[in-house]
Image (tube, rainbow, N blue to C red):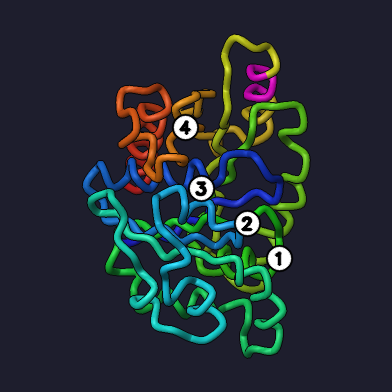
Amino acid sequence: MSKIISLANQKGGVGKTTTSINLAAALAAQGKKVLLIDADPQANTSSGLGVEIRELSNTIYECLVNGVDPHSAIVATGVNNLSLIPSHIDLVGAEIEMLNLESRELLLKHLLEPIRNEYDYILIDCSPSLGLITVNALTASDSVIIPVQCEFFALEGIAKLLNTIKIIKSKLNPSLKVEGFLLTMFDNRLRLSNQVYEEVKRHFGDLVFNTVIARNVRLSEAPSHGVSVLEYDPSSRGAKNYIALAKELIARQK
């Protein structure tokens, strides 16, 4: 059975895109067929997987605004079992264009219905906002992973995101659940990282993934080469963390 998971947090710089790319690659490495959707106008997920956006005819923008068949927007990546629907800067204006469309909160859900069973996992990298595109992503998803940076303002804004999820559950997607909180940029040498971990664990208990993503320079370097960290340096701590996260996620489905 396929599963659609959004990666969301309106706070920027918490590791959403890094996690989207590397978790998708790690799931693919476990033999799962994965579709990654770049729903951020910055298109960092697309460029981070080596996709040349200027050469594309169709992206998630054309699918949402013009009703283009999603199959025509899917591109292969350099990773076996991993495909991508890329983004484009035009997505910045999509929310305004979508305002006049019927059932605008359900556009992505309807878009994915015909293709969801072609994949084991569909991951959606959301933009750092709680706008209409993110609402579409959450409405289309079965669950949401919330990356949380191990820094001082880690919990800032999470209440607002959880309230948005609550509203979407009540009005648009009753089955939506929080898959888990993922601690990123963790450094066990720092007291602050450990304090943030304990605070998140105290607030959210079993919803916190056992796997934490350590601060790792290879994770920062890999996107500039257009590959995931699993291809860039499979022996790195970052690669091992995301493989562990993929295995933990798969185990939760059993």
Residue 92 placed where, x, y %? 66, 68
Going from the N terminus, do you reach mark 3 or mark 1 first?
A: 1
Look at mark 1 in the image and give the residue it sits on: 131
Disc 1 to disc 4, C-alpha distance: 30 Å
Type of amino acid at the residue the image marks with label 3: Glu
Q: Is residue 172 magenta?
A: no
Instruction: Classify residue 1 by image quadrant.
Output: bottom left
Disc 4 residue crowd, few under 14, some 14–19, many 20+, Cα 10 Å: some
Going from the N terminus, do you reach mark 3 or mark 2 first?
A: 2
Foreground label between 3 and 2: 2
138 lies above or below 125: below
Seen in the image, is 158 located left or right of residue 114?
right
Determine the secondary structure under disc 1: loop
Determine the secondary structure under disc 3: strand
Segment tinted magenta in the rendering: 193-198
Look at mark 4 in the image and give the residue it sits on: 221
Which is more toward the observer, 75 or 101? Answer: 75
Q: Which mark is residue 179?
A: 3
